[in-house]
Image (spheres, helix red, strand yellow):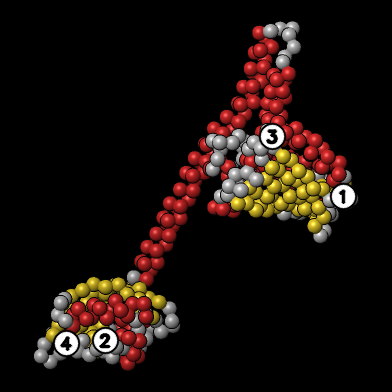
Amino acid sequence: MFNKYKRFFDNAYDGFAILDLSLPFEVTRHLDVNQQFCDMLGYTKREVLDLGPIGLIHPNSRETVRMHLQGHYNKTQSQSFMKSTFIRKDGTEISLESKLFSEKTKSYHIVFGVHRDVTKKYYMEKTIKEQLAKEAALRKELEAQATEKSNYIRLIVHELKTPITALLAAVELSKQNPGCELPELSLDNIYDSVIALDKRVDDLSNLAKSQMNLLKIRPVMLNLADLTNQIVNVNKPSFQRKGQIFNTDIQPDLPNIYADKECLFSILMNLLSNAGKYCGKDGKISLNIKQFGDDILFEIADNGIGIDPNNLERIFDPYDRIKRISKTYSGLGLGLFLSKTFIELHGGKIWVDSVLGMGSKFSFTIPNRQPPQSVEE
């Protein structure tokens, strides 16, 4: 009978190990192990018996094994199931699921362990869990993007419809009074509506080009003094109507700059427009331009609402404004993103300093040299 069980012990598919439970965990030894247990760990039988469990168990699993053995030692359980990690002879880890059975007589106190290698199983489970987590995260991201795009489409419709509504009203007024000149206020509204509509269409067009890497610049030699005067003349009346103070500090004798005139004009118009929009009536806005090493530094500051520190990192992301204050202020929220894109195409940088409730200062540089040839058409 003994030989029969011995053959079963030695030839079992699972790893079998008999542990002396009469000794403390730190010094206990295996009384016997089968060949499968040795093969799983890459040791000879003699090496396994000499090392003992403490030399085979991964440090992270030693407390788990000790607690299970303690339960058997205290007779609180005669059998148990545990998961643990052992270390193979080559240093790699092996995950085991083990069933432990204990028996105590006057002459011995042992634990019989049946150990199964589940390393591949655990790896597959871990991989599946990771893939499921990635899939869930991707699904959540796609749902958020879908919601964001849906919200943005609604915003686009609103922003395009607003100036169109004003145009339709002016046309309706003209139809009702044929032959009569439109009031100056109506003409102003028509002009403002056309400008607003044109800007929104340009922004959407530039966004599409940017996403397809088709946005290009056409740099030429510019006279900064002329460009600055044009910017000031365009913006000053708008600021004055709102009771806002507009100050400029332009370094005299600034050198000519190699840049795309329309892009630079658009950048300054957008930043100044934002300053006027977010500082409200009686606000203060400033435009400073000066030489900054090999670059030209532009600074647009206001004493408006400022920017929440939590939003500073994504302030230049497209669609960012829709997540924050789109219900309070008009616009598609593309201005800062496009400004940053244009500035970087010139080889410059843009950054912002802001204190919530006190105002913001946007600064950007344009190198006083020809931009990379790759950006030219």
Q: How many residues crowd mark 1 within 10 Å: few (<14), some (14–19), many (20+)?
A: few
The residue that disc 4 covers is 109
Q: Is residue 339 above or below residue 57?
A: above
Disc with the residue nearer the chain's start (2 vs 1): 2
The C terminus is located in which quarter?
Answer: top right
Q: Amino acid at mark 2?
A: Phe
At x 71% / y 43%, what residue is drawn? 285
**In the foreground, 176 or 282:** 282
Q: Upstream in the sequence, badge 2 or badge 3?
A: 2
Front-most of residues 217 and 339: 339
Residue 12 seen from this side: no
Give the foreground label among 1 and 3: 3
**Depicted 293 relative to depicted 4: above or below:** above
Q: What is the spatial separation of the Cα atoms under label 1 and label 3, in whole angstroms? A: 28 Å
Above or below 26: residue 247: above
Residue at 72% over, 15% down: 183
How many angstroms separate mark 4 from mark 1 (CA)?
A: 96 Å
Q: Circles 2 and 3: CB distance less than 8 Å?
A: no
Which quadrant holds the N terminus? bottom left
Under tag 4, what secondary structure? strand
Lower position in the chain sequence, tag 4 or tag 3: 4
- What residue would you read off at disc 1? 252
The mark lying in front, picked from 4 and 1, is 1
Dot 2: element: loop
Q: Secondary structure at mark 1?
A: loop
Q: State the image quarter where residue 233 is shown.
A: top right
- Residue 228, percent across and down? 82, 42
Residue pointed to by mark 3: 243
| Mark 2 vs mark 1, CA separation in Å | 84 Å
